[in-house]
Structures are given as C-alpha cells and as structure tokens.
Amino acid sequence: MGGAEMTAKTPIKFGTDGWRGIIAEDYTFENVRYCAQGLAEYLEDQGLHFHGVVVGYDTRFESEDFAAAVAEVLAGNGIRAYLTDRANPTPVVSLGILSQKAGAGVMITASHNPARYNGFKVRSAYGGAAAPEVLAELEGRIADAQAQGRIRRVPRRAAESEGLIVLFDPGDAYRRQVGGLVDLEAIRNAGLRVVADAMYGAGAGWLAHLASGRTTVVEIRGERNPIFPGINPEPIPRNLGALFEKVREVGADVGLATDGDADRLGVCDEQGRFVDQLRTYSLLALYLLEVRGWRGPIIKTISTSSMLEKLGRLYNVPVYETGVGFKYVAPKMLEVNAICGGEESGGYAFRGHLPERDSILAGLFFLDLMVKLNRRPSELVEY
C-alpha cells in the first residue's frame, strides 16, 4: 500500500513500561503488527535477529491472538518466534528469553490497567525492560514502518511448518529458577494459611503450585475473566476488598495479590489490612540483608521509601535512586549488581533472577521472611 493511500496512523509511544492503548481504537492488529515490524528491523540491525524472539501474553481480551500476530510478523522478517503455549506472567515470559537464549522478548499485556486496554512490552536479551534509548529507537522505526505501510508477515500455519513459529512452555525453566532462589520446602512445611488473589490475571495458580504442602493456599479470582468485573487488576486497596474479606473469613496468616500480568505484588496482614508497597519493599530488602545475608546495592525510584535509606546505612550498602519505571531500574540493577530494585507501585526485582518485576518470587520471599523470623505480617511491620 502506498503512502498516498494511507490514513493517519496512531503514534506509538512507549511509556514507563511499554505501549498501551484502548482495544479496537488505537490498540489494533495493524498497530501491533507495526510494533512487531519495527522491532524486527531493529533486531536485524543489531545482529540479534539470529537468536529469535520470545512472545508471550496475559489473560486479557484477544491477547493470544495479538501475540500470534506479533509472531507472524517476526516470521515474515525471517526471525524465529518462540510463542508461549498459554497465558503466562510477565516474569515467566521474561525468564523464557534467557532459557531460549533469545535476542529479545515481547509481552502482550496492559498489566494493571482497566479491561479496555492492552499493551506491547519489549524485553531485552537480559530479560528486563528495554532501556529508554532502545525504546526511543523503536518508536522511530515503528513510525517509519507506519509511514511506508510496511508489514512483512507469514500466516501462522505456514510459519509453524517452516519452523519460524515454535510453541513452547516457559514454566518449567521458571519453576527450576525459583526453586533455586527460595526455600520452597520450608514454606511448604510451615503450615501457613495463605490467600492468593490472582485478580483474574496471568498469575493464577502459580503461588498455589509453588507454596502448597502443609501450607494451604486458598486462591480467589483465579479464573480468566477479561472484563475484570468490578476492579482494575491493580493490587491496591480499592481493588482488594475480596482479598481482605477472604483472609478474615478463613483466618489466614497473610494475603498476597498479583496484578494482571503478575509483575506487581500486593500484601495484606492476617487481619485483612493492606501493607503498603513502601513497607513491603523495605521488608523484602530486610529479608535479603538480614535473613539471607546478601550484600550489595539497593535500587529505588524517586518516590520510594526513606526506610530503604535507613537499611542502607544500617547494613552499609549503597542505595541508588532512579527515575520512575523499570526501564530505568533494570539497567541500574545490572550496572551496579544490585541485590534488589523496586518501585512504589509494588514491582520488585532481585539479584540472581531477572532485572524484572516479579510478584510471584516477591510473594515467596515474603512468605519465607514470615517463616524464618516466625512472625506474622503485622509483627513484621513493627519489626
């Protein structure tokens, strides 16, 4: 299609963590394909196209079909797409980039946003958010593809037969990784009662699978429902009434909530009271420093807790501050080999894993903190 025949195109701009738009308005199959085309051309110029791209998706409306559209465009550019075989959390997909030794990753998700949104996250070869300068270059390449009406695409069935689209399950690699990072047996044998709120998102089943044993995990809102009835899938108090109520109803020791793509964590104590994200991050940092004996820098965003500064002084570790968004946090974590990075929205990342927010691992670390210190959340807050 020539430029003269083109209608005005939606400008694609990457925010704090990817491009998001309203489904069927600016978030269309055409625009998603342009995003994939721009990414393919960038990877080719960087010599990363030989390694393939991991493509994953969450439980939102049509996410699996948008992901397939991305895979078709990558295939059309001669790049192998490792397409996940089901909806997965963003951190599981990000680890899949490492397990497949891919050159990049794409996650179709709008994370915690309302149901009418979907999105396009780009992940670098190291499994974390692409750096701001990479995203800026992608925006330019996408705009050029739009201006020229340039989309190269191979239909899925043909691409699969040619080995250019390969279905895979990233879950096994993730389970192995997490099993090496946290004492799952101690958690499973602790006899805790945990309520896990998946908020209808991609985190459904993960905490129950990893933590259950003598410990009981009661899951709520674990079914797929792209409408997210009555809530936005963001783990903040106004969306967590069902979690608070269930914790009190079953006499749970703690409640853990994961957002739409399971990269953000919300915590409530045994009385169904929300533990704010700043306290949660400080407790996770305390866990790494005190319980695990880790040493190294801590990364926080501008608006994160001053409690982290106090921990830094107490344990003689540096605390670095970045702009808001993991596109700033992830590169800084890699630069200084930080033990953790976090932000005020409930996203936390850890050394030895990924420079990527992971609510599942963060939730398991929180449970291990409870077990190792033999304290309930309300007691930890006062610790």
Image (spheres, rainbow, N blue to C red):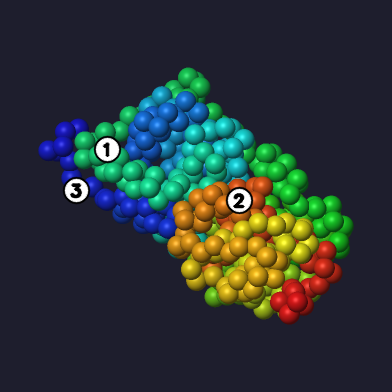
Task: Say the numbered circle drawn on residue 145.
Answer: 1
Report helix, strand or loop for mark 3: loop
Task: Say the numbered circle drawn on residue 192.
Answer: none
Residue in front for this viewpoint, 36 or 193: 36
Q: Determine the CA span between mark 1 and mark 2.
A: 37 Å
* Residue placed under numbered mark 3 in the picture: 8
Q: Of label 3 and label 1, which has the lower sequence position?
A: 3
Q: Quadrant of the C terminus?
A: bottom right
User: Horizontal and vertical percent for residue 115?
Assistant: 45, 60
Above or below, comparing residue 347 to residue 2 in the picture: below
User: Horizontal and vertical percent for residue 37?
Assistant: 35, 36
User: Horizontal and vertical percent for residue 241?
Assistant: 61, 75
User: Mark 3, mark 1: which one is toward the viewer?
Assistant: 1
Above or below, comparing residue 255 to residue 207 in the picture: below
Asked whether the beta carbons under mark 2 and mark 3 sit within 8 Å of each other, the answer is no
Image quarter of residue 142: top left
Task: Please name the residue shown 69% across and 60% down the image.
Answer: 363
What residue type is disc 1 on? Answer: Ala
Q: Quadrant of the N terminus?
A: top left
Residue in front for this viewpoint, 198 or 106: 106
Task: Please name the residue shown 32% across and 46% down the image.
Answer: 139
User: Horizontal and vertical percent for residue 84?
Assistant: 56, 38
Task: Please name the residue shown 18% across and 45% down the image.
Answer: 7
* Residue placed under numbered mark 2 in the picture: 337
What residue type is disc 2 on? Answer: Asn
